[in-house]
Image (cartoon, helix red, strand yellow):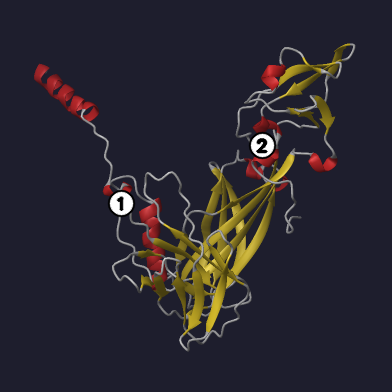
């Protein structure tokens, strides 16, 4: 028994005391590779191609957009359609209205002189989205999509989405402190910062295949699960879903990308594998390029989910720890001994409605931290054009 305990002790010591930090070679490499995201839309909607460069694992920034490039859509007869950069790595064209009978590819030229070409691709016609629905489960509200292709020719689907929701700050701020004149000013209606709109785009890869089914039907394919305590469900939530038809090769690329980026972390997960896209560097055949350009029409559908339509008892939890305190405003000339607290972080210069008048020329009011009283720190007060 003593030997057994000693052996266990030595094993535990080796596990916890002999660990050394591992810095993979990828963290120190100077290489930066092109990443291409987007779909050539042959219809009347916009085509948006996003270009960026990879960063090392220990880099201080995670976003590295590529600006100043020349991006062109071209067909097999050398007809071209230029895309215009917005200065943030996005290259955009309004409706291209391309003939669906031709093949198309993407040509990219960077400011450094590197040239890239995607393979020619057929146009895929994406079937409409039948419906977007949701079901309330114990661990969240599951949003799903339904679709089908009567011609039985799509089989491979991809989706992304754009979420919008209305939320409010923890406390209502109807007045604010002017830090120059040290006076309290009431907010005008257009200065109110209680109600805001939040927005978030999908960051995961959502796929489905109907190749093993007798019919090309997608039924309740999961899109996103929202926790029941999320402030997205506090009042009203909207989701815009976009659907893309894929080729078999494009589906395989996205499936591999999903495994490499979302399904790693344990011995039971898929092991990392090389990503083989359809974009190539023509000036350096050994340079990897990350991305797969498809040519497909895009179908979209939006739904709204009001909190009143959900089962009773679903209530949002404010995502920050908030507290109020009381300060006193004296004779319109300044604050008492708490003013140093007020004008230094982390407390806000926001104030709720004065709550009392404890003495002549003295007004008491509540105050809190900015994140608890100003919703514009996490959203915008501008009402989206589609909101209803």
Could you tell me residue 86's position as x and y percent?
Answer: 59, 63
**Residue 182, image quadrant:** top right
Q: Residue at x 76, y 32 (%)?
A: 172
Q: Tag 2, which secondary structure? A: loop
Q: Quadrant of the C terminus?
A: bottom right
Could you tell me residue 200's position as x and y percent?
Answer: 59, 51
Q: Tag 1, which secondary structure? A: loop
- Crowd band around label 1 with a 10 angstrom C-alpha radius: few (<14), some (14–19), many (20+): few
Measured along the vertical axis of the image, is residue 245 above or below residue 28?
Answer: below
CA gap, disc 2 and disc 1: 52 Å
In the depicted view, which residue is nearer to us: 288 or 203?
Answer: 288
Q: Earlier in the sequence, mark 2 or mark 1?
A: 1
Q: Residue at x 44, y 79 (%)?
A: 121
Q: Quadrant of the N terminus?
A: top left
Q: Is residue 2 visible?
A: yes
Q: Provide the residue designation for mark 2.
A: 313
Q: Are marks 2 and 1 in contact (CB under 8 Å)?
A: no
* Marks 2, 1: nearer the viewer: 1
Q: Is residue 215 visible?
A: no
Q: Residue at x 64, y 27 (%)?
A: 322
**Residue 133, image quadrant:** bottom right
Q: Is residue 271 left or right of residue 138?
A: left
Measured along the vertical axis of the image, is residue 211 above or below residue 348?
Answer: below
Q: Is residue 321 left or right of residue 336?
A: left
Q: Residue furthest left?
A: 3
Check residue 29 in the rendering and tell me which mark sits there, or answer none: 1
Q: Is residue 278 left or right of residue 227?
A: left
């Amino acid at each position: 028994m003593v030997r057994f305990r000693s052996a266990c002790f030595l094993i535990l010591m080796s596990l916890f005391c002999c660990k050394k930090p591992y810095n993979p070679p990828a963290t120190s490499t100077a290489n930066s590779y092109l990443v291409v995201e987007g779909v050539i839309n042959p219809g009347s909607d916009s085509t948006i191609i996003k270009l960026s460069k990879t960063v090392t694992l220990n880099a201080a920034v995670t976003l590295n957009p590529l600006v100043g490039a020349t991006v062109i859509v071209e067909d097999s007869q050398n007809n071209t359609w230029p895309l215009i950069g917005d200065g943030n790595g996005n290259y955009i064209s309004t409706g291209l209205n391309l003939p669906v009978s031709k093949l198309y590819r993407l040509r990219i030229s960077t400011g450094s002189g590197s040239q890239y070409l995607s393979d020619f691709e057929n146009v895929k016609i994406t079937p409409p989205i039948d419906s977007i629905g949701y079901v309330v489960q114990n661990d969240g509200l599951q949003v799903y999509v339904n679709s089908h292709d009567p011609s039985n020719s799509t089989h491979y689907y991809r989706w992304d989405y754009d979420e919008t929701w209305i939320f409010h700050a923890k406390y209502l701020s109807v007045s604010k402190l002017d830090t120059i004149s040290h006076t309290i000013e009431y907010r005008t209606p257009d200065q109110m910062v209680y109600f805001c709109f939040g927005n978030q785009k999908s960051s995961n890869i959502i796929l489905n295949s109907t190749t093993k089914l007798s019919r090309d039907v997608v039924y309740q394919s999961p899109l996103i699960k929202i926790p029941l305590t999320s402030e997205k469900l506090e009042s009203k939530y909207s989701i815009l879903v976009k659907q893309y038809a894929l080729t078999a090769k494009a589906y395989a690329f996205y499936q591999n990308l999903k495994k490499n980026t979302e399904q790693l972390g344990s011995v039971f997960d898929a092991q990392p594998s090389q990503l083989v896209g359809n974009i190539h560097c023509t000036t350096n055949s050994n340079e990897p390029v990350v991305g797969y350009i498809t040519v497909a029409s895009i179908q979209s559908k939006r739904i709204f989910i009001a909190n009143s339509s959900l089962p009773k008892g679903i209530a949002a939890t404010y995502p920050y720890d908030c507290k109020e305190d009381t300060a006193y405003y004296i004779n319109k000339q300044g604050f008492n001994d708490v003013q140093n607290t007020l004008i230094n972080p982390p407390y806000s210069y926001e104030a709720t409605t004065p709550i009392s008048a404890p003495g002549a020329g003295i007004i008491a009011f509540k105050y809190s931290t900015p994140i608890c009283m100003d919703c514009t720190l996490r959203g915008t007060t501008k009402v989206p054009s589609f909101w209803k």
